[in-house]
């Protein structure tokens, strides 16, 4: 029996490299050769200067980030999030510039601070599906 889940990505041909890298413990970004900026979530074109897909390539992120903001979730009716409460939904600033929605793990709520340094780690959320989360 498989229950409906709201936490699984729908990988396609374009995002497959991202998910394959995540399964190997690497966070990928997209970087534009025209303006030099990195972005996340992955898009085929550059969201800063609209350069096309031939100018934007994958690169490995350092995995370093700082905490921009967060919210500790105590109730979520969408499966399977209800089984995980409380958890810390967060927005982090990656060292390379992009801001990323994620989750902070292994950190008590009382220790969360704006600007605190974080490092990426990966959680297997389903068979072979690894999600980037961050820890202090
Ligand atoms: Zn660009």
Image: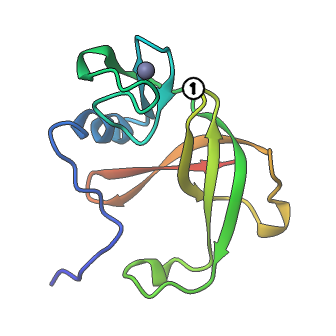
Q: Nearer the viewer, residue 21 or 89?
A: 89
Residue 23 appears left or right of 26: left
Q: Which residue is mark 1?
A: 62
Residue 45 appears left or right of 100: left
Q: Position of residue 42 (x, y in %)?
A: 36, 38
Q: Quadrant of residue 94?
A: top right
Q: Position of residue 3 (x, y in %)?
A: 23, 83
Q: Residue at x 40, y 11 (%)?
A: 33
Residue 37 appears left or right of 8: right
The residue lying furthest to the top in this view is 33
Q: Nearer the viewer, residue 41 or 23?
A: 41
Q: Position of residue 59 (x, y in %)?
A: 41, 21
Q: Residue at x 37, y 50 (%)?
A: 130
Q: Quadrant of residue 22?
A: top left
- Vertical side of 12 occupied by 3: above or below: below
Q: Quadrant of residue 16?
A: top left
Q: Quadrant of the N terminus?
A: bottom left
Q: Secondary structure at mark 1?
A: loop
């Amino acid at each position: 029996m498989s229950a409906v889940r709201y936490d699984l990505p729908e990988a396609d041909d374009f995002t497959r490299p991202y998910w394959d890298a995540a399964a190997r413990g690497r966070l990928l970004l997209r970087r534009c050769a025209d303006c030099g900026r990195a972005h996340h979530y992955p898009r085929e074109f550059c969201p800063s200067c609209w350069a096309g897909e031939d100018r934007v390539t994958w690169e490995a992120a350092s995995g370093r980030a700082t905490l921009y903001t967060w919210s500790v979730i105590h109730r979520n009716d969408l499966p399977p999030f209800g089984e995980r409460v409380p958890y810390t939904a967060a927005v982090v600033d990656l060292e390379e510039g992009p801001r990323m929605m994620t989750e902070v793990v292994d950190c008590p709520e009382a220790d969360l601070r704006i600007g605190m340094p974080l490092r990426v780690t990966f959680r297997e959320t389903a068979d072979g599906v690894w999600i980037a989360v961050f820890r202090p």
